[in-house]
């Protein structure tokens, strides 16, 4: 172990210890305790950012294209920004938390639980990340696009999600009550795989277009445009805006890897992203209102809703963490690992097992919103705490962080534009999902995404044989690399 890694782990251990102390002190209602709990998260993010930067050969591009970047953004919003908002404006709390009631001690306790998980995740991540070697080549070799099979994959994916849309009520359900489309999407794996097949074709077309040398650019643009339109249509039809956002983040990773933008493009992209976030929040508010009014009426109501309220459902993960941390184990018994044992069970299709558990998000909803057909995310820390307390948070977060550290270690070694990097770009946005939602359900959804994208990639011409040769080339290059090529 090098000295820098040792210092980073020591700092993360200190953050975890402080968070654990604050989490067990039920009288921590003083502002200094609340500030200290927030500081554990901020310190864990900064220490890990410095360590990842050093262990990535001082390449900020490798940091930005890593799961840690998404994790840091998620924690900064949910576990730093949202707690401060609730501390200053307690009336902004979600419905369940507002009815339950909370005080500064409850906020401190929840933030401390989050801080313990952040420290554990970061420690596992930097240990598994290792030292990142520089890529041997800037991009993968050119490949021949299989136009017929690419179009066939696009059509097949559309048929799959379109079939699910019709099964869930079609245009009538979308127009009268959009939320009903999401109310009971069980045994729907084929539909989500179809959405990812369409999005996978789009990612392949984008990758090929960015690497095209002037030939076949027009057909690539046509396929990319068609995939974008059909992906957006699938997201609206099935009311799964999250899948569209994940596909957008995967596309952004491909663009950043192949065409690093100028400062002007970064500013323009940030402005476009801000508008997109507002639009997605508005869409979410419209969908929520359709539970008790038509879609047209919901759109009018959402237009008169305060902007901060549009983000209540997205930021409500922390609110629900506060609520569950106050109820467990005093009023709600611990699960003793029940949802963790459901992770391998998630791989069984619901069509073969109709009684398959719905996941921790549905369990939480049954307590916080009884009778409502919703799923309530309580974060990775919330699920682990509900299972077995502080020890589960520490060990579970450490393992999940190590898993994503290994994903970054392997994925970032492949050249941009290659099939394996495309798979890595698909996995990358799921960092947010695994930090906020149930582990079992997100494992299932990740498999759907990989299956859909891999089918699309095979149809487009991304062959596994080429990936295997690429791995061999990278392995040989790594053995030839001199020790001085890696900055510790």
Image: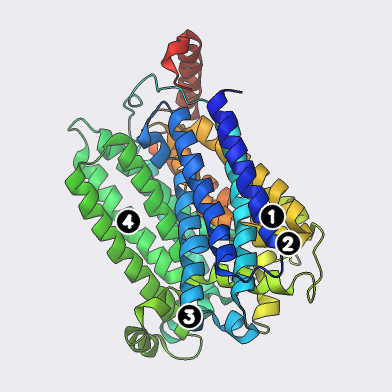
The residue identified by callout 4 is: 228
Within-10-Å neighbours for mark 1: few <14, some 14–19, many 20+ = many
Within-10-Å neighbours for mark 3: few <14, some 14–19, many 20+ = some
Q: Kindly report the distance in space between the C-alpha atoms of the residues bearing marks 1 and 3.
A: 27 Å
Asked whether the residues under the numbered discs 3 and 4 touch, taking CB atoms below 8 Å apart as contact, a structural biologist would say: no
Asked whether the residues under the numbered discs 1 and 4 touch, taking CB atoms below 8 Å apart as contact, a structural biologist would say: no
Q: Kindly report which numbered mark, 3 or 4, lies closer to the viewer in this rendering.
A: 3
The residue identified by callout 2 is: 24
Residue for point 52% across, 55% down: 39
Q: Is residue 48 left or right of residue 62?
A: right
| Residue 403 visible in the shown view | no
The residue identified by callout 3 is: 92
| Closer to us: 409 or 460 | 409
Instruction: Look at the numbered disc 1 and give the secondary structure of its residue.
Output: helix
Residue 160 position, x and y percent, is 49, 60
The residue identified by callout 1 is: 20
């Amino acid at each position: 172990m090098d000295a820098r890694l040792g210092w980073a782990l020591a700092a993360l251990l200190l953050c975890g210890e402080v968070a654990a102390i604050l989490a067990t002190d039920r009288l921590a209602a003083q502002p200094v305790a609340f500030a200290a709990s927030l500081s554990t998260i901020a310190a864990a993010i900064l220490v890990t950012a410095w360590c990842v930067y050093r262990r990535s050969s001082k390449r900020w591009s490798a940091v930005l294209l890593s799961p840690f970047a998404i994790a840091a953004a998620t924690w900064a919003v949910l576990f730093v920004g949202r707690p401060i908002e609730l501390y200053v404006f307690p009336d902004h709390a979600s419905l369940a938390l507002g009815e339950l009631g909370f005080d500064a001690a409850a906020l401190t306790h929840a933030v401390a639980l989050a801080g313990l998980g952040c420290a554990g995740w970061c420690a596992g991540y930097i240990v598994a990340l290792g030292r990142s070697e520089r890529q041997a080549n800037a991009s993968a070799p050119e490949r021949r696009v299989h136009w017929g099979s690419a179009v066939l994959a696009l059509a097949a994916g559309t048929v799959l999600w379109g079939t699910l849309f019709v099964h869930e009520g079609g245009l009538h359900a979308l127009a009268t009550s959009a939320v009903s489309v999401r109310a009971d999407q069980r045994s729907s794996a084929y539909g989500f795989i179809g959405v990812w097949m369409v999005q996978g074709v789009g990612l392949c077309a984008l990758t090929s277009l960015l690497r095209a040398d002037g030939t076949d650019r027009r057909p690539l643009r046509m396929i990319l445009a068609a995939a974008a339109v059909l992906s957006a249509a699938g997201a609206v039809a099935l009311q799964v805006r999250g899948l569209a956002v994940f596909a957008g983040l995967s596309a952004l990773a491909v663009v950043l890897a192949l065409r690093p933008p100028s400062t002007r493009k970064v500013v323009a992209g940030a402005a476009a992203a801000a508008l997109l976030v507002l639009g997605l929040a508005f869409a979410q508010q419209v969908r929520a209102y359709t539970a008790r009014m038509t879609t047209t009426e919901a759109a009018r109501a959402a237009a008169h809703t305060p902007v901060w309220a549009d983000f209540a459902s997205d930021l409500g993960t922390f609110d629900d963490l506060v609520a569950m941390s106050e109820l467990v184990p005093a009023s709600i018994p611990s699960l003793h690992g029940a949802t963790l044992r459901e992770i391998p069970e998630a791989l069984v299709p619901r069509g073969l097992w109709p009684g398959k558990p719905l996941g921790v998000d549905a369990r939480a909803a049954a307590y916080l919103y009884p009778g409502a057909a919703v799923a309530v995310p309580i974060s990775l820390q919330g699920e682990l705490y509900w299972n077995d307390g502080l020890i589960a948070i520490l060990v579970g977060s450490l393992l999940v962080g190590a898993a994503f550290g290994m994903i970054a270690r392997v994925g970032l070694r492949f050249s941009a534009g290659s099939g394996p990097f495309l798979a890595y770009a698909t996995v990358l946005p799921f960092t947010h999902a695994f930090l906020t939602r149930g582990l079992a359900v997100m494992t299932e959804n990740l498999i759907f995404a990989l299956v859909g994208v891999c089918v699309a990639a095979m149809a487009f011409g991304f062959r596994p044989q080429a990936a295997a040769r690429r791995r061999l080339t990278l392995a040989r290059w790594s053995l030839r690399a001199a020790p001085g090529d890696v900055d510790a």
